[in-house]
Image (cartoon, grey):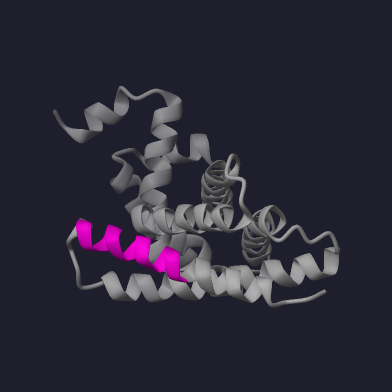
Amino acid sequence: MPSSTRTARLSAADRREVIITAAIEQFAIHGFDAASMDEIAAGASVTKPIIYRHFHSKRSLYLELLREVGDRLTSAIATATATVEPPHERLRAGVDAFFQFVQHHRLAYLLIFDGRGQQDVEFQRVIDEIQLTIAELVASRVSGVEDDTYRAFVSFALIGLAQGAARSYLLDIDHHESERFRARLATKRAAQTTELLWSGMRNLST
């Protein structure tokens, strides 16, 4: 059955999800300016008018993608850390969830952390808010720090180290197609990142 026929039978919510998936790929690979709405439509097996029924413009689509991906990553980390009690184990759970997201949703991760939105003030503001929300989520659940200024410092340090570790991981798996290798390395990098973060946080003082 042709893909266009399958897409035509999707519900509005499912069709929106197909568009989001195609758009993430185009924007993550090409950036906002170079990404083509024609290519997004082709990737989603829809016409451009259908895309504009769901999203008013290319810009609104991109902003929605940023928020959607940010919500998914934040939710994954929040769920992973919600019922884990010892702070060290909670940190490990959060970092594990982060690396699982990087492994299984590489393009979505790059949409937020690759830096392509930095040339646009509005895009970068949304990206900054997402990154800070994620970092504060982990910092508040792990560090127990009540001082707002210090917690913000810890949050930015967390996101910086995790982002660098994820970049290293993505470079390491570039030439490895084996999902087993990628999963094993993601687990290893999560453990290493956890110990770096934990050691740093335990040796800091307010």
The dominant secondary structure in magenta is helix
Between 115 and 31, the residue placed more toward the observer is 115
- Residue 164 location in percent, x, y? 49, 76
- At 84% across and 69% down in the image, what residue appears? 149
Q: Quadrant of the N terminus?
A: top left
Q: Is residue 197 left or right of residue 202?
A: left
Q: Which residues are magenta?
A: 180-192
Where residue 83 sits, quadrant-wise, is top right
Q: Does residue 177 show up magenta in the picture?
A: no
- At 38% across and 46% down in the image, what residue appears? 21
Between 171 and 183, the residue placed more toward the observer is 183
Q: Which residue reaches farthest front?
A: 86
Q: Quadrant of the C terminus?
A: bottom right
- Residue 42 location in percent, x, y? 29, 47
- Residue 181 location in percent, x, y? 22, 63
Q: Does residue 185 show up magenta in the picture?
A: yes
